[in-house]
Image (tube, rainbow, N blue to C red):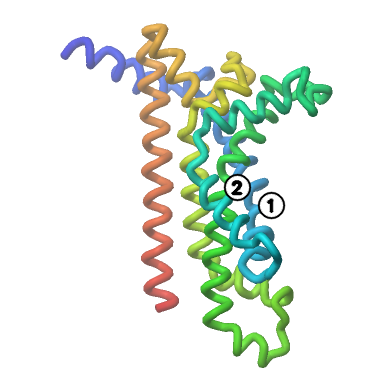
Amino acid sequence: MRQLDGPFGTAFELIASGDATLMGIIALSLRVTLTAVVLACLIGLPLGAALALGRFPGRGAVIVLFNALMGLPPVVAGLVVYLALSRSGPFGGLALLFTPTAMVIAQTILILPIVVALTRSVVEDLWTEYREQLRSLGASRLRAVPTLLWDGRVSLLTGVLAGFGRASAEVGAVLIVGGNIAGHTRTMTTAITLETSRGNLGLAVALGIILMALTLGLNTAAWGLGQWARGRLG
Protein backbone atom coordinates (compact mmCIF):
# COMPACT_ATOMS: atom_id res chain seq x y z
CA MET A 1 0.00 0.00 0.00
CA ARG A 2 2.89 2.27 0.85
CA GLN A 3 4.34 1.64 -2.61
CA LEU A 4 1.07 2.83 -4.16
CA ASP A 5 0.92 5.89 -1.94
CA GLY A 6 4.37 7.04 -2.98
CA PRO A 7 3.81 7.71 -6.70
CA PHE A 8 0.35 9.15 -6.14
CA GLY A 9 1.60 11.41 -3.38
CA THR A 10 4.43 12.65 -5.60
CA ALA A 11 2.00 13.08 -8.49
CA PHE A 12 -0.37 15.29 -6.53
CA GLU A 13 2.56 17.34 -5.24
CA LEU A 14 3.78 17.90 -8.81
CA ILE A 15 0.31 18.95 -9.96
CA ALA A 16 -0.34 21.19 -6.96
CA SER A 17 3.04 22.92 -7.25
CA GLY A 18 2.72 23.46 -11.01
CA ASP A 19 6.01 21.68 -11.69
CA ALA A 20 7.75 23.32 -14.66
CA THR A 21 8.60 20.02 -16.38
CA LEU A 22 5.05 18.76 -15.98
CA MET A 23 3.52 22.01 -17.27
CA GLY A 24 5.93 22.11 -20.21
CA ILE A 25 4.96 18.59 -21.31
CA ILE A 26 1.24 19.36 -20.98
CA ALA A 27 1.58 22.65 -22.89
CA LEU A 28 3.43 20.98 -25.78
CA SER A 29 0.90 18.13 -25.94
CA LEU A 30 -2.03 20.55 -26.12
CA ARG A 31 -0.28 22.79 -28.67
CA VAL A 32 0.51 19.88 -30.99
CA THR A 33 -2.92 18.26 -30.68
CA LEU A 34 -4.94 21.48 -31.05
CA THR A 35 -2.91 22.48 -34.12
CA ALA A 36 -3.52 19.06 -35.66
CA VAL A 37 -7.25 19.30 -34.95
CA VAL A 38 -7.49 22.74 -36.58
CA LEU A 39 -5.60 21.55 -39.68
CA ALA A 40 -7.73 18.41 -39.92
CA CYS A 41 -10.91 20.52 -39.75
CA LEU A 42 -9.68 23.04 -42.36
CA ILE A 43 -8.97 20.16 -44.77
CA GLY A 44 -11.60 17.64 -43.68
CA LEU A 45 -14.77 19.75 -43.52
CA PRO A 46 -14.75 20.91 -47.17
CA LEU A 47 -13.42 17.54 -48.35
CA GLY A 48 -16.16 15.66 -46.49
CA ALA A 49 -18.82 18.01 -47.86
CA ALA A 50 -17.46 17.52 -51.39
CA LEU A 51 -17.65 13.76 -50.97
CA ALA A 52 -21.23 14.05 -49.70
CA LEU A 53 -22.56 16.23 -52.51
CA GLY A 54 -20.19 15.51 -55.39
CA ARG A 55 -20.69 12.77 -57.94
CA PHE A 56 -17.59 11.47 -59.73
CA PRO A 57 -16.08 8.14 -60.82
CA GLY A 58 -14.50 6.29 -57.92
CA ARG A 59 -16.48 8.17 -55.25
CA GLY A 60 -17.47 4.95 -53.55
CA ALA A 61 -13.85 3.79 -53.37
CA VAL A 62 -12.78 7.13 -51.84
CA ILE A 63 -15.53 6.86 -49.22
CA VAL A 64 -14.49 3.31 -48.34
CA LEU A 65 -10.85 4.43 -48.14
CA PHE A 66 -11.58 7.23 -45.65
CA ASN A 67 -13.81 4.92 -43.58
CA ALA A 68 -10.98 2.38 -43.45
CA LEU A 69 -8.41 5.02 -42.51
CA MET A 70 -10.40 5.86 -39.37
CA GLY A 71 -8.85 2.71 -37.94
CA LEU A 72 -5.35 3.50 -39.17
CA PRO A 73 -2.82 2.23 -36.58
CA PRO A 74 -0.84 5.19 -35.19
CA VAL A 75 2.49 3.40 -35.66
CA VAL A 76 1.73 3.04 -39.38
CA ALA A 77 0.93 6.74 -39.65
CA GLY A 78 4.16 7.50 -37.81
CA LEU A 79 6.14 5.24 -40.11
CA VAL A 80 4.70 6.90 -43.23
CA VAL A 81 5.53 10.38 -41.94
CA TYR A 82 8.99 9.21 -40.85
CA LEU A 83 9.77 7.85 -44.32
CA ALA A 84 8.48 11.05 -45.95
CA LEU A 85 10.51 13.36 -43.69
CA SER A 86 13.70 11.30 -43.35
CA ARG A 87 16.80 12.44 -45.20
CA SER A 88 16.18 10.00 -48.04
CA GLY A 89 12.45 10.86 -48.20
CA PRO A 90 10.76 13.32 -50.55
CA PHE A 91 10.54 16.01 -47.85
CA GLY A 92 13.85 15.29 -46.13
CA GLY A 93 15.25 18.67 -47.15
CA LEU A 94 12.76 20.44 -44.88
CA ALA A 95 14.49 19.02 -41.76
CA LEU A 96 11.18 18.51 -39.97
CA LEU A 97 11.86 15.10 -38.46
CA PHE A 98 12.02 15.07 -34.63
CA THR A 99 10.28 18.45 -34.39
CA PRO A 100 6.78 19.39 -33.12
CA THR A 101 5.82 20.07 -36.75
CA ALA A 102 6.40 16.41 -37.64
CA MET A 103 4.20 15.43 -34.70
CA VAL A 104 1.45 17.77 -35.91
CA ILE A 105 1.61 16.18 -39.38
CA ALA A 106 1.32 12.66 -37.94
CA GLN A 107 -1.61 13.58 -35.72
CA THR A 108 -3.37 15.41 -38.55
CA ILE A 109 -3.16 12.23 -40.64
CA LEU A 110 -4.80 10.32 -37.79
CA ILE A 111 -7.62 12.84 -37.25
CA LEU A 112 -8.36 13.74 -40.88
CA PRO A 113 -10.23 10.50 -41.84
CA ILE A 114 -12.50 10.91 -38.79
CA VAL A 115 -13.41 14.48 -39.77
CA VAL A 116 -13.92 13.61 -43.46
CA ALA A 117 -16.06 10.51 -42.82
CA LEU A 118 -18.21 12.24 -40.21
CA THR A 119 -18.68 15.37 -42.34
CA ARG A 120 -19.68 13.28 -45.36
CA SER A 121 -22.24 11.34 -43.35
CA VAL A 122 -23.75 14.43 -41.68
CA VAL A 123 -23.88 16.56 -44.84
CA GLU A 124 -25.28 13.69 -46.93
CA ASP A 125 -28.11 13.10 -44.45
CA LEU A 126 -28.93 16.81 -44.21
CA TRP A 127 -28.88 17.22 -47.99
CA THR A 128 -31.37 14.35 -48.34
CA GLU A 129 -33.62 16.00 -45.74
CA TYR A 130 -33.42 19.60 -46.96
CA ARG A 131 -32.68 19.15 -50.67
CA GLU A 132 -36.08 20.24 -51.95
CA GLN A 133 -36.29 23.26 -49.66
CA LEU A 134 -32.79 24.44 -50.52
CA ARG A 135 -33.38 23.99 -54.25
CA SER A 136 -36.66 25.93 -54.03
CA LEU A 137 -34.61 28.78 -52.54
CA GLY A 138 -32.23 28.64 -55.48
CA ALA A 139 -29.32 27.02 -53.61
CA SER A 140 -27.09 24.75 -55.66
CA ARG A 141 -25.14 21.88 -54.09
CA LEU A 142 -22.08 24.13 -53.72
CA ARG A 143 -23.99 27.06 -52.21
CA ALA A 144 -25.79 24.71 -49.81
CA VAL A 145 -22.54 23.53 -48.19
CA PRO A 146 -22.21 26.37 -45.60
CA THR A 147 -25.86 25.98 -44.60
CA LEU A 148 -25.55 22.22 -44.20
CA LEU A 149 -22.30 22.49 -42.22
CA TRP A 150 -23.86 25.04 -39.88
CA ASP A 151 -26.99 22.95 -39.40
CA GLY A 152 -24.89 19.91 -38.56
CA ARG A 153 -22.49 21.79 -36.29
CA VAL A 154 -23.35 19.86 -33.12
CA SER A 155 -22.75 16.46 -34.68
CA LEU A 156 -19.58 17.72 -36.35
CA LEU A 157 -18.26 19.21 -33.12
CA THR A 158 -18.85 15.92 -31.32
CA GLY A 159 -16.79 14.17 -33.97
CA VAL A 160 -14.03 16.76 -33.71
CA LEU A 161 -13.88 16.17 -29.95
CA ALA A 162 -13.55 12.45 -30.64
CA GLY A 163 -10.66 13.21 -33.00
CA PHE A 164 -9.00 15.38 -30.36
CA GLY A 165 -9.34 12.58 -27.85
CA ARG A 166 -7.74 10.07 -30.18
CA ALA A 167 -4.83 12.35 -30.99
CA SER A 168 -4.14 13.39 -27.40
CA ALA A 169 -4.06 9.76 -26.22
CA GLU A 170 -1.94 8.25 -28.97
CA VAL A 171 1.75 7.48 -28.47
CA GLY A 172 3.07 5.46 -31.41
CA ALA A 173 3.11 8.07 -34.17
CA VAL A 174 4.49 10.98 -32.12
CA LEU A 175 7.16 8.72 -30.62
CA ILE A 176 8.40 7.68 -34.07
CA VAL A 177 8.48 11.13 -35.66
CA GLY A 178 9.13 13.21 -32.53
CA GLY A 179 11.81 11.14 -30.88
CA ASN A 180 10.62 11.95 -27.32
CA ILE A 181 13.29 14.66 -26.84
CA ALA A 182 13.11 16.33 -23.42
CA GLY A 183 11.92 19.92 -23.59
CA HIS A 184 11.40 19.71 -27.36
CA THR A 185 9.13 16.86 -28.48
CA ARG A 186 8.14 15.08 -25.27
CA THR A 187 4.36 14.79 -24.91
CA MET A 188 2.21 13.38 -22.12
CA THR A 189 1.90 9.90 -23.64
CA THR A 190 5.57 9.50 -24.60
CA ALA A 191 6.66 10.91 -21.21
CA ILE A 192 4.45 8.39 -19.39
CA THR A 193 6.08 5.56 -21.34
CA LEU A 194 9.59 6.82 -20.63
CA GLU A 195 9.14 7.72 -16.96
CA THR A 196 7.47 4.37 -16.23
CA SER A 197 10.41 2.49 -17.75
CA ARG A 198 12.76 4.64 -15.64
CA GLY A 199 10.81 3.96 -12.45
CA ASN A 200 9.94 7.66 -12.06
CA LEU A 201 6.35 6.81 -11.30
CA GLY A 202 5.43 10.13 -9.66
CA LEU A 203 5.71 12.12 -12.90
CA ALA A 204 4.14 9.28 -14.90
CA VAL A 205 1.14 9.12 -12.56
CA ALA A 206 0.77 12.92 -12.59
CA LEU A 207 0.67 12.93 -16.39
CA GLY A 208 -1.76 9.99 -16.35
CA ILE A 209 -4.09 11.89 -14.03
CA ILE A 210 -4.01 14.96 -16.29
CA LEU A 211 -4.59 12.82 -19.38
CA MET A 212 -7.54 11.02 -17.78
CA ALA A 213 -9.01 14.35 -16.64
CA LEU A 214 -8.68 15.64 -20.20
CA THR A 215 -10.39 12.55 -21.62
CA LEU A 216 -13.18 12.79 -19.06
CA GLY A 217 -13.64 16.48 -19.84
CA LEU A 218 -13.90 15.79 -23.58
CA ASN A 219 -16.45 13.03 -23.12
CA THR A 220 -18.45 15.23 -20.76
CA ALA A 221 -18.40 18.04 -23.32
CA ALA A 222 -19.54 15.66 -26.09
CA TRP A 223 -22.35 14.30 -23.91
CA GLY A 224 -23.38 17.79 -22.87
CA LEU A 225 -23.49 18.97 -26.47
CA GLY A 226 -25.68 16.04 -27.42
CA GLN A 227 -28.08 16.73 -24.56
CA TRP A 228 -28.17 20.44 -25.36
CA ALA A 229 -28.85 19.75 -29.03
CA ARG A 230 -31.70 17.35 -28.27
CA GLY A 231 -33.28 19.87 -25.91
CA ARG A 232 -32.73 22.91 -28.11
CA LEU A 233 -33.24 21.52 -31.58
CA GLY A 234 -35.67 18.72 -30.80
Q: Residue at x 59, y 61 (%)?
A: 60
Please state which amino acid type lies under the numbered disc 1: Ile
Q: Is residue 179 above or below residue 53?
A: above
Labels 2 and 1: the sequence-earlier one: 1
Q: Residue at x 67, y 58 (%)?
A: 47
Q: CA distance from mark 2 to mark 1?
A: 8 Å
Image coordinates of residue 207 in percent, x first then y, are 42, 25
Q: Which mark is residue 43?
A: 1
Looking at the image, which residue is at 46% across and 14% down? 194
The quadrant in which the N terminus is found is top left
Q: Quadrant of residue 176?
A: top right
Identify the residue at the far top of this view: 198
Depth order, front residue of 197/13? 197
Tell which of 176 and 20 is nearer to you.
176
Residue 126 in the image: x percent, y percent? Answer: 54, 75
Q: Most extreme residue toward the left, as rendered?
A: 1
Tell me the number on the disc at residue 112.
Answer: 2
